[in-house]
Amino acid sequence: MSAMQCREFRDIADSFLREELSDKPTHNIIEHFESCAACRSELAARRNLRERLRAACASDAEVRPEFVEQLRLQLRAAGAHNTFEKDARRGSEPDPL
Ligand SMILES: [Zn+2]
């Protein structure tokens, strides 16, 4: 079995985003990423949430812990399809902002 499975991809996607993976898994994840549109969207959604979480942490004093916790739960929920479907739908429409 040479091709990485979606489940395997999702298991290590967060490590990939934290740049904690060594060369070989990184190669595998990129290979899967390039051949699987679902996982491309998944990774984009997770990266987006991570960046929002990081931004929230960076602006520290103003941010309540509950807010950060909420973002963390969203990040976890990114494994479900809600987040990226919402993003995909938004991508096809004019941005209201
Ligand atoms: Zn996949």
Image (cartoon, rainbow, N blue to C red):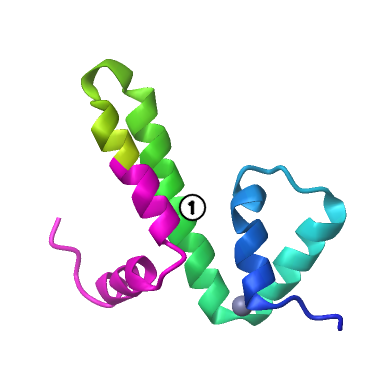
| Image location of residue 64, percent across then percent down | 23, 26
Residue 16, how many percent across, how many down?
66, 52
Q: Position of residue 31 (x, y in %)?
A: 75, 72
**Which quarter of the image is occupied by the C terminus?**
bottom left
> What quarter of the picture does the N terminus occupy?
bottom right
At a point 44% along the width and 54% down the height, the residue shown is 76
Give residue 44's position: percent from left, percent from top. 48, 61
- Say which quarter of the image contains residue 33: bottom right
Give the residue at x 86% y 80%.
2
User: Residue placed at 43% from the left, 61% from the top?
Assistant: 45
Q: Which residue position holds label 1?
A: 47
- Under mark 1, the amino acid is Arg
Write the start and end of the magenta stretch as one range: 70-97
Q: Is residue 67 above or below residue 89?
A: above
Is 85 on the left-hand or right-hand side of 1? Answer: left
* Residue in front for this viewpoint, 91 or 36: 36
Horizontal side of 4 relative to 62 (left or right) equals right
Q: Secondary structure at mark 1?
A: helix
Q: Quadrant of ligand 1?
A: bottom right
The residue under the point 63% across, 73% down is 7
